């Protein structure tokens, strides 16, 4: 496992994850298509919100099970609590510092969620 630091664009939200990047996912649900995020799934025990809880705002739709978090200051989506596996988070890999996704397999997830 490796440790990665991440943040939103303005730095108000900062977090740390541990992962070995078995794969990344892209989802085809209505919100994921629009935010175009590439995600890695981590268990909640491998995620630490270092700063910015007060800067986060939450958005839910469809079944209101998944919890999508955005920075109130810059609007960036750094992570979400997953719908199917709520003890895991989907981390937007484009928010990770110094991360290169080259060579890591990408799985297309079927979100099947509509607005």
Image (cartoon, helix red, strand yellow):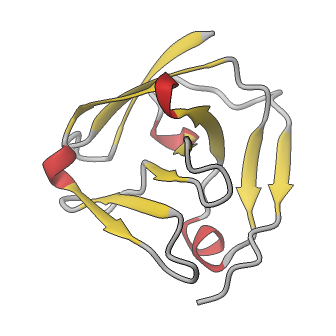
Q: Is residue 74 above or below residue 104?
A: below
- Picture quarter containing residue 100? top right
Residue 35 higher or lower than 1, as above or below? below
Q: Residue furthest left?
A: 54
Residue 112, image x, y percentages? 77, 77
Task: Specify the quadrant of the image occupied by residue 67.
Answer: bottom left
Residue at the image position 23 percent from the left and 46 percent from the top: 10
- Work out whether residue 34 or residue 41 is closer to the camera in this orientation and state it: 41
Instruction: Give residue 104's quadrant in the image.
Output: top right
Q: Residue at x 28, y 34 (%)?
A: 14
Q: Horizontal and vertical percent for residue 36?
A: 61, 63
The quadrant of the picture occupied by the C terminus is bottom right
110 horizontally vs 9: left or right? right
- Looking at the image, residue 68 lies above or below residue 113: above
**Image: 74 above or below 94:** below
Q: Residue furthest top?
A: 1
Q: Who's the residue at 42% across and 56% down the image?
A: 77
Q: Position of residue 41 (x, y in %)?
A: 64, 39
Q: Is residue 96 left or right of residue 76?
A: right
Quarter holding the N terminus is top right
């Amino acid at each position: 496992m490796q440790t990665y630091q991440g943040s939103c664009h303005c730095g108000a939200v900062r977090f740390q994850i541990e992962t070995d990047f078995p794969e990344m996912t892209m989802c085809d649900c209505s919100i994921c298509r629009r935010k175009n995020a590439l995600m890695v799934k981590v268990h909640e025990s491998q995620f630490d919100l270092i700063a910015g809880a007060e800067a986060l705002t939450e958005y839910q739709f469809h079944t209101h099970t998944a919890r999508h978090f955005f920075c109130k200051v810059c609007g960036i989506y750094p992570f979400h609590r997953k719908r199917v596996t709520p003890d895991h988070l989907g981390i937007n890999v484009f928010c990770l510092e110094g991360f290169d996704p080259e060579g890591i397999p990408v799985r297309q997830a079927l979100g099947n969620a509509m607005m």
